[in-house]
Amino acid sequence: MPKVIEYWFKKTIVVNLILIYLVIIAGSIVRSTGSGMGCPDWPTCFGQLIPPTSVEEVTWQPNALFNKGEMIIKDKKLFVSLDDFKSTSSFNVNKWVVYEKHDYAIFNPFHTWVEFINRLVTVVLGFPILLMLVLSCFYIYKDRVNIYLSLATVFMVAFQAFLGKIVVDRNLQGTTITYHMLGVFILIILLLWLYNRNKEKSTFITIKTKRVVLISLSTIILSLLMIILGTQVREEIDAIAKVNIDRSTWISELSYMFYLHRSAVWLIIGLNGLLWYNLRSITTYQYLMKSIIVLIFLEAFVGVILVYLDMPAFSQPLHLLLASLLFGVQVYLYLRMRTEIKMEV
């Protein structure tokens, strides 16, 4: 195996991890700004590769050129052009078809471009993911698991793109957004698995029980459940925001899920504290445990800001980013432990 291949394979894994977190940031900004339907179709935006910047571009006008597939808003409905043509002095219904996948027919240039940039970030992710797959093929005789994990990663990226289309087609239906979010965390697991398998192995460490590994796994599961609960709370906030613009009353209108999500923070603190106690004498893992503790503190602090400062928009993407980083560090710690620890029962 050429050293240069190993070097660049590891580098592409790191690049993909960074891009995944950029995708999370971009997606959360889309969500917090209410820009999810900024582009009413997929993969184009209003039927165009480059989205419109003004309402005139999505409004029917006489003596104007329209391209096949281009979308306009008329009579509070979306219409799609059936062919390339130049309009006459009156609207010709035979040149258009009503877009029936959903009834969302609003143009907001800010929302459109926020969503479009989110899509661009996802497209950029596709290139190093494919490069990683190509480089993994050089491991066919040395380590085929690298190929299988790279294939799984490419499949998940493609599946995420498909889910993105479903999310738009169903006008941001709650369950599809949750599935879309879970797909991102599966990608984080796959990439961290690849990274851990291809890093230089450390000296094995012996501990006295399997309990610590099970505790580590439990922290991952609990964090994932917290993120899912948070997604459900976010869906409730989206619904409340549509009918109530007074942010100061949003918290009082939330269901038990919010209080369950908030109370579960103590479980997160307790379980991770127990993990730290069991690993306190192992220097190798102290930097990971310190990272986990700092991330939990920051996550709780941002949670307080959300509750007591009427959910400022900037805090929502930050809250999700911190939760995602915490999940990633916990997964990596677990993988390291599984690789490096010899357990004594």
Image (cartoon, rainbow, N blue to C red):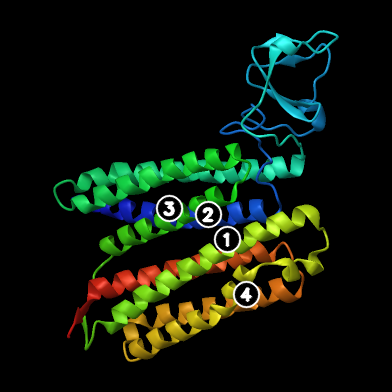
How many residues crowd mark 4 within 10 Å: few (<14), some (14–19), many (20+)? few
Of tags 2 and 4, the one toward the viewer is 4
Residue farthest toward the left in the current orientation of the protein: 141
Q: Are marks 2 and 1 in contact (CB under 8 Å)?
A: yes
Q: CA distance from mark 3 to mark 1?
A: 24 Å
Q: Is residue 283 above or below residue 115?
A: below
- Residue carrying label 2: 178
In the picture, the disc for residue 259 is: 4
Say which quadrant the C terminus sits in.
Answer: bottom left
- Which residue sits at x=37%, y=69%? 332
- Pointer 3 or 4: first along the chain: 3
Q: Secondary structure at mark 1?
A: helix
- Residue carrying label 3: 16
- Pointer 3 or 1: first along the chain: 3
Q: How far from the left and from the top, in percent, is residue 230?
A: 58, 65
How many residues crowd mark 2 within 10 Å: few (<14), some (14–19), many (20+)? some
Nearest the eye: 81 or 55:
81
- Residue carrying label 1: 231
